[in-house]
Amino acid sequence: MKDSKPRDFIRQIIHDETKNQDSRKVITRFPPEPNGFLHIGHAKSICLNFAVANENKGKTFLRFDDTNPLKEDDIYVQSIKEDVSWLGFDWEDRLTFASDYFENLYQAAIKLINKGLAYVDSLNANEIREYRGTLTEPGKDSPYRNRSPEENLELFKRMKNGEFSDGEMILRAKIDMKSPNMNMRDPAIYRIRKHAHQRTADKWCIYPMYDFAHALSDAYEGITYSLCTLEFEDHRPLYNWFIEQVETEHRPRQIEFSRLNMAYALTSKRKLHGLIINKIVDGWDDPRLVTISGMRRRGYPPNAILDFCERIGITKKDNYIEMGVLENSVREELGDTTQRRMGVLDPLKVTIQNFENDKVEVLEAQNHPQIPEFGMRKISFTKELYIERSDFKEDAPRKFHRLKPGGEVRLRYAYIIKCEEVIKDSSGNIEELICSYDPDTKSGTGKSDKKVKGTIHWVSAEHSFDAEIRLYDRLFKVHNPAASDDLEKTINPDSLKTVQAKLEDSLGAEGAPPSFQLERTGYFCLDTKLSNEKKRIYNRTVTLRDSWAKIEKAAMSQG
Ligand code: ATP
Ligand code: MG
């Protein structure tokens, strides 16, 4: 971080703690569970962990927290690696798995048993819940709590050897059943799960619980700052208890920050999974999701996501960020990095009556209005063209500076045209406009001093191609869909609209930019998952302006 920027509270803590050390040691980790694809909330955590380490010449581990074989899969491991790399972060040789430490964790559990700090409980899950008490009532000791270390060791080994079934026995830490902090009421540390693990296969049938595995994996890796979200604040005493009682060499420090929640979106892998299995969306990478793969497919550049994460900052206050904030970062990034092209989303045919039938006039167009290095391209002007239907109005108000009957408008990079005649079908729909062009008004020549107020985009009918464009709106109708019991009811039925567009030929040519701005219309990208040689499908990445901000403002002023 540049020194001029104020430090967030985590960076401040790290700064204060390390400023007097000769060699600052900042080791962080990003610890996803491989049970789903990553989302924008994870991006916040990834950015924080990697950036904080980088700023302090430290290192970051990518560690998969794979302690629950029922839910985890290598597909998710692969997707998470891809997403972290795509965001631009490099874990180098620090790719690890909690399962790498299964043997150490097992030994740590034995150590706790030997110290009289862990016991095998034979209560069943319901009984354990009952004995646990509530927030207002203390828990009760299990009748098995005072088994001797020898007996516990014996039972724990038998658990490991597969002699019991799932749930029959459980290893618990012996802490305090009356603690006001429920996490300290003899939490489970090992459970039986007779299920093959994606990495260790059938080697183990007992698996460490998250809190135990997480704290100790941090310690084994020499993590100095274990940055996690606020819901783990109440787990911190347990985190510290494990570290202290197992007497690990390194003593990591846990610091919590607020989760990122996005308005009108979902950031919970479990709930996202529900949308996918119920086929409400087209997989984890559906462009309407704020999964990293969805945003990538939608055309969001990684830098926009990094910029967004920097803007929202790191605090301890939970809140909801409006989608418009993320979209602004996307717009800003794409504004300077993508080339301009022309395309018509709702085509209206225009015939230039005074242009020769088979003539093709090649014109030059800028690829970016402010960045000359992006160069120029050739576009073809012909007798038959398409313009945007909304750029013509029959009964146009005075301030409508685009095309109207008898009116004139400039076609971008080409000529001024005049609408001579409107052709309608039998039901009165406008089918075509007959126009004339003024050959003296070619853009950039300065031959004529004729001026018109409006400039519109267009494509040549012959030198354009048909493309399907997918226009996205927010996936949910409600501000916080996660709070709903019936997710399907919160889905916005208009979240995906498809239109048949006409795009200028250069977009179909070899070497065409996969992501571009259609002038006056928005940013788009080729959907490589859906497109094939016969059919090109594009996603609208983002509109040119934040239309939602306007709509929201309007909704708010209406109360
Ligand atoms: P989910 O509810 O989506 O499954 P999770 O916390 O269970 O999220 P993990 O795979 O355990 O998912 O998360 C890995 C890391 O990412 C954790 O350190 C977690 O705190 C962090 N993280 C997850 N969601 C968010 C979020 N919305 N904002 C910030 N950090 C998050
Ligand atoms: Mg988790």
Image (tube, rainbow, N blue to C red):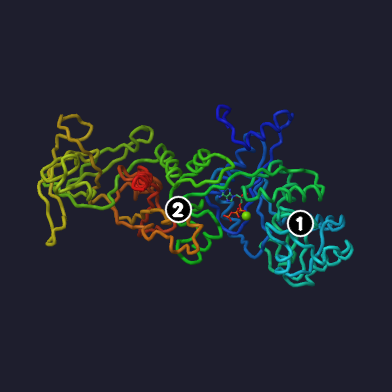
Indicate the secondary structure of the residue bearing disc 1.
Answer: loop
Please give the residue where the numbered disc 1 appears in the rendered image: 178
In this rendering, position of residue 504 left or right of residue 158: left
Residue 181 appears at what percent x and percent y? 71, 53
Whether residue 473 is situated above or below residue 152 in the rendered picture:
above
127 and 286: which one is in front?
127
| Residue kind at label 2, given as amino acid type | His
| Residue kind at label 1, given as amino acid type | Lys
Q: For residue 113, what is the image quadrant?
A: bottom right
Q: Which mark is residue 479?
A: 2
| Residue drawn at x 50%, y 63% as measured from the top left | 485
Going from N to C along the chain, the mark reached first, 1 or 2, is: 1
In this rendering, position of residue 67 left or right of residue 260: right
Q: For residue 397, what is the image quadrant?
A: top left
424 and 145: which one is in front?
145
Residue placed furthest toward the front:
136
